[in-house]
Image (cartoon, grey):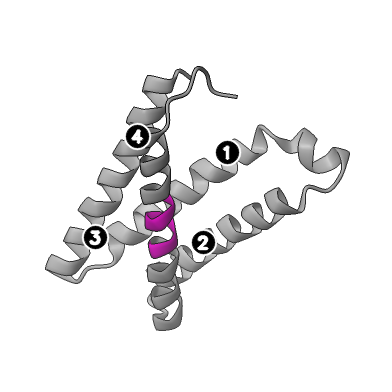
Amino acid sequence: MTNREFIILVVLTLVAHIAVLVVLVATRRITPLLILNVLVAAVSLAYLATRLRYIFVGPDWQMLAFAAAELTALGLAAAAYRGWRFTAAMSIVVFGLHLFAAIAATTFVLLFKWDRLI
């Protein structure tokens, strides 16, 4: 993945989060938020699946915690889709965390120049 592709991916992620936030505020429907939470969690877990060797060689507690958080996000979204109010509220919290991460990543890629991705 080139730097340009990474920047486009990060900016599109932020745009998707802002669009879902606008839809949530305008329509008060949580379904688009849940779909985006599932997509972000699934992509994050797919990325972690490519890094399993780092988890099994010696326990990488940060990656394990990240995987547990994203699995929890998937479970919360599924339960919220079934209509459970507490999990709907927690899915909104997860969305906020994903939005914060998207803002941080976009800020990072737009403010710092890289020669290559590691």
> Comparing marks 1 and 3, which lies closer to the viewer?
3
- Give, as a single range, the part of the protein colored magenta: 96-101
The crowding category of the residue bearing disc 1, from other C-alpha atoms within 10 Å (few below 14, some 14 to 19, many at least 20), is few
Mark 1 and mark 4 lie on one chain; the one further toward the N terminus is 1
**Separation of residues labelled 1 and 4 (CA atoms):** 25 Å
User: Who is closer to the viewer here, 95 or 46?
Assistant: 95
Q: Secondary structure at mark 4?
A: helix
Determine whether, in the image, residue 89 is placed left or right of residue 59: left
Q: Are marks 2 and 3 in contact (CB under 8 Å)?
A: no
> Can residue 82 be seen in this snapshot?
no
**Separation of residues labelled 1 and 2 (CA atoms):** 14 Å
> Comparing marks 1 and 4, which lies closer to the viewer?
4
Which residue lies under the disc numbered 2?
Answer: 73
* Place of residue 49 in the rendered image (x, y in percent of width and height, measured from the top left): 66, 37
**Separation of residues labelled 1 and 3 (CA atoms):** 25 Å
* Place of residue 58 in the rendered image (x, y in percent of width and height, measured from the top left): 87, 43
Q: Secondary structure at mark 3?
A: helix
The crowding category of the residue bearing disc 2, from other C-alpha atoms within 10 Å (few below 14, some 14 to 19, many at least 20), is many
Q: Amino acid at mark 1?
A: Ala
**Residue at horizontal 64%, vertical 52%?**
67
| Residue 99 counted in the magenta span | yes
Q: Residue furthest left?
A: 26
Which residue lies under the disc numbered 1?
Answer: 46
Q: Secondary structure at mark 2?
A: helix
Q: Amino acid at mark 4?
A: Leu
* Place of residue 54 in the rendered image (x, y in percent of width and height, measured from the top left): 78, 37
Which residue lies under the disc numbered 3?
Answer: 21
**Separation of residues labelled 2 and 3 (CA atoms):** 17 Å
* Place of residue 28 in the rendered image (x, y in percent of width and height, measured from the top left): 19, 71
The crowding category of the residue bearing disc 4, from other C-alpha atoms within 10 Å (few below 14, some 14 to 19, many at least 20), is few
Q: Quadrant of residue 87?
A: bottom left
Mark 1 and mark 2 lie on one chain; the one further toward the N terminus is 1
